[in-house]
Amino acid sequence: MLLATVSFGLCFAAWGLVSAFAPAFREEFGLSGQATSLLIAVPVLLGSLARLPMGMLTDRFGGRLVFTSLFAAVAVSAAIVPLADSFGMLLLFAFLLGLAGSSFAVGVGFVSPWFPPARQGTALGIYGLGTMGQSAAVFLGPVIAAAVGRDAVFIGLAVLIAGWAVVFAATARNAPSTKPPATVGAMVTVLTTEPLAWVLAAFYFLTFGGFVAFSVYLPTLLRDDFGLTLADAGFRAAGFVVLATFMRPVGGVLADRHGGATVLWWVFLAIMPFGLLLTWESMVPFTIGALATAALLGLGNGAVFKLVPEHFPGSTATVTGLVGAVGGLGGFFPPLVLGFFRDQTGEVWPGFVLLVLTVGALWVLNSRVLLRPRRA
């Protein structure tokens, strides 16, 4: 558990490093709002798309080998970012660094077999604390860069991850397991015959995708709209990540007691008014809206993954992979939408209105598809 959580934290730190320095990259390369948003979003894209194949590789070859190989790839990707001398090259290196985001699927496959089903929820909740690695990146990255330079931060993290790869390979062990690995056929079957899997994926698209989108875009938004320094913006974004991360296991506990659909009903209902506060370009209401949204998204994350084994006891791993991949993609689009509105109108508040409308649609979907049959 300790090895996996530290591994996940290091990978998520690498995953969030480009977004931490996005304002600085924008100034260096003279990027528009949309170009900056694209730079922030591309690591999220690869990290999301790679979750399915990385999860399947973990099922087949074990987390020890896959995690060690992932560390090597992430270390190289982080080390070459300082070599970028054009926006196109930076975009390519950021995309490659996005592979670190697939570490969630690898860690789930590595941790789960070590625990009985009754304890897997708690185990994965603890493992999920590794997402705080991203908060460390967005807060500590600019602070350290002010002292030693931005390039040194990327190279230092690459060296740290490479060293951790050696430690992990030497000490980690795969759990003995007789469970057959997930296959592409099983995933295709779920996609074509289980529409409820897509409903759960839509819920995670919002809850986890919203968490990712806020965590990677907040430093840029806070600097643009409120004139904060890079370090101050990173500190506030780190607070968002930490709060959402700690609320995730709370959402799982509440889902155990009251049902995941009931928790999501309240989560979606509460996000709507707090989401509207994000349209207010004043620090106090925006902060209240952002922190409340962080807590609610964290609760929603925990609730969604309690619904998966409840509705798919025979294909939990497959549906978890699908839901996780779609949820990761949810973090790719919002920064692009906000960047579009920034360039076209000079404002980002229409993007938050779209967030509220999307939440309202999912609230209705949850009420009709999950809560109504449960009450009946």
Image (cartoon, rainbow, N blue to C red):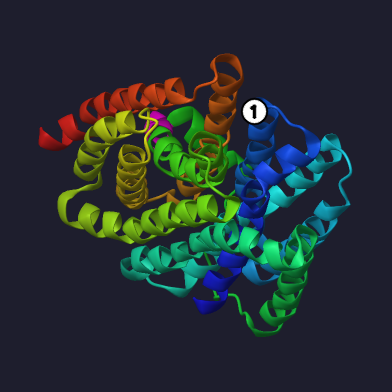
Disc 1 secondary structure class? helix
Residue at coordinates 70% horizontally, 67% vertically from top-left? 147
Label 1, on which residue? 33
One can see residue 19 in this view: yes
Q: Mark 1 belongs to which amino acid?
A: Gly
Magenta segment: does it hold 197? yes
Residue at the extreme bottom of the image, as rendered? 171
Q: Is the magenta stretch mostly helix, strand or loop?
A: helix
Residue stretch rendered in magenta on the structure: 194-200
Q: Is residue 65 above or below residue 106?
A: below
Please tell me which residue lies in front, 270 or 228. Answer: 228
The C terminus sits in image quarter: top left
Residue 17 in the figure: left or right of residue 221: right
Q: Can you say whether 255 is above or below 222 in the image?
A: below
Residue 23 appears in which quarter of the rendering? top right
Query: Which one is in front, 268 or 344?
Result: 344
Is residue 131 a member of the stretch shown in magenta? no
Measuring from the top left, give residue 267's x and y in whole percent.
Answer: 25, 40
